[in-house]
Image: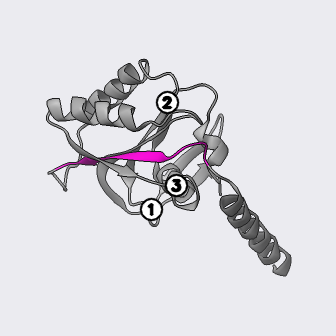
Amino acid sequence: MAATISEELKKISEKLRFLKETELPATLYDIFIVHEDKINGLADKQILSIENTLKNTVKNYPYVKVSIAKSTTDGTNARRVKVKTAGRAKTIVTGPTEAPHVHICAIGDNSKSARAYVQKVTSLLRERGIHSRIESKNRRYKAMNYLNYCYKQADYFHQYGNKNFNYKDYILDD
């Protein structure tokens, strides 16, 4: 038992060191979707519309990588658990449930920022009646924590855009 606790502490210290030493290639932007219906959240049709808007718009911005994470779990107590099934093991998210919502992150490359892309997406979403606002994260610790927060509560996590960058390289799995 004592060996397992020390191993867990070692894993945690390695994760913290990774977060402190690593820097994203550019500033991370979050598109925060404001939905009036706090009980029912976003409908599947609205989430699909948002995802299609992201996919179609990123084609005009080749330097941008965008991710969308759909969640029905409260992020503060969420946990990803592998469950053995007849075939391949499935990963499910456990924790207190809440209304369906999405987390959208966009990042540029070393030379260009994703700010123009994020502004275009928010204007397109507002035209469709989906209220949203832009939140800028930094390149370091705060942005890395936000990526981990989004991933650990996500029912699905999709990425579109720049092939040279992968969000999962910066996500710490449990």
By what rule are the colours in the image chosen? Answer: one colour
Q: Earlier in the sequence, mark 2 or mark 1?
A: 2
Q: Nearer the viewer, mark 2 or mark 1?
A: 2
**Do we see residue 47 in this rendering?**
no
Amino acid type of the residue that numbered disc 2 sits on in the rendered structure: Val
Q: Residue furthest right?
A: 3
| N-term mark: 3 or 1 | 1
Q: Quadrant for the C terminus, please.
A: bottom right
Q: Position of residue 109 (x, y in %)?
A: 57, 34
**What's the residue at 58%, 61% (across, down)?**
141
Mark 2 and mark 1: span between their CA atoms? 32 Å
Q: Secondary structure at mark 1?
A: loop
Residue 51 image offset from top left, x and y in percent: 35, 30
Residue 143 disc label: 3
Q: Is 146 in the magenta?
A: no
Name the residue that disc number 1 marks. 95
The spot of residue 8 in percent (x, y) is: 75, 70
Task: Decide whether residue 29 is among the magenta residues.
Answer: yes
| Residue 64: mark in rendering | 2
Q: Quadrant of the N terminus?
A: bottom right
Q: Which residues are magenta?
A: 24-35
Q: Secondary structure at mark 2?
A: loop
Observer-nearest of 134 and 103: 134
Looking at the rendered image, the disc whose residue lies closer to the viewer, 3 or 1, is 3
Q: Position of residue 19 (x, y in %)?
A: 66, 60
